[in-house]
Image (cartoon, grey):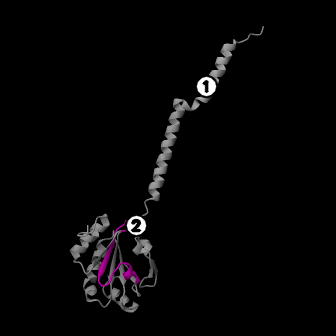
Amino acid sequence: MTQHRPAHREQSARSSWRVGIDTGYLNPVRAGRVVHDVRVLLILLSVLLVGCGSAAPAADQLKFDAKTLTGEDFSGASLAGKPVALWFWAPWCPSCRAEAETVAAVARDHTDVTFVGVASRDKIEPMKQFVAERGMDGFSHIADLDGAVWKRFGVTAQPAFAFISAKGKVDVIIGAPLADDLDRRLDALAKGEPQPGLG
């Protein structure tokens, strides 16, 4: 004999099945998984955004191409994002000759700062001789024969320094600072602090 389920029970079972499907995303276990997945996506997105924004902008003055005294190509943009000290000099300059030993020494001591010499106002051979005689070969030197790099930094007299922070801030000092003063400036530069006396 065939038994028939009451109509109201069959309707209730169907309704429960539908509710189970329609409200599945509200299940505590599934909801927890969704929240976890969203959190993971947000973390990944934040990492990507930080990575994209970590590149330091290049100072306008660093947008140049030049040749070193040894004839190699040199891109100013390669210095972006680093603490940099540019030393502007000329081989015949008495003050440059007098401070060359000090500059070479502080460059050796401050390995956390990239040093680059920018020679101008003379020819290649006297520039090379200057570097060789004064032991200045511990860092690269640009042959700025037409003075274009000097002009970019507003340098009109030698010696001079341009201190460029990793964030692209440029401070130019005309003259020959004492060794202690130069040390303080390089320490501040490496730490990302303002240049002493310049704020």
Q: Residue extending furthest right?
A: 1
Is residue 169 toward the left or the right of residue 2 in the image? left
Which quadrant is the N terminus positioned in?
A: top right
Q: Earlier in the sequence, mark 1 or mark 2?
A: 1
Image height check: is 34 above or below 21?
A: below
Is the residue marked by circle 1 packed among few (<14), some (14-19), or many (20+) residues within 10 Å? few
Is residue 78 toward the left or the right of residue 173 in the image? right
Magenta region, residue range = 148-168
Q: Which mark is residue 81?
A: 2
In the foreground, 179 or 46? 46
Q: Secondary structure at mark 1?
A: helix
Q: Is residue 165 magenta?
A: yes
Which quadrant is the C terminus positioned in?
A: bottom left
Q: Nearer the viewer, mark 1 or mark 2?
A: 1
**Horizontal and vertical percent position of residue 153:** 36, 78
Quadrant assignment, res 17: top right
Residue position marked by numbered label 1 in the rendering: 19
> Which three-letter amino acid code belongs to the residue tagged 2?
Gly
**Horizontal and vertical percent position of residue 27:** 54, 29
**Horizontal and vertical percent position of residue 107:** 31, 75
> Which three-letter amino acid code belongs to the residue tagged 1?
Val
In the foreground, 51 or 19? 19
Image height check: is 3 above or below 148?
A: above
**Horizontal and vertical percent position of residue 6:** 69, 11
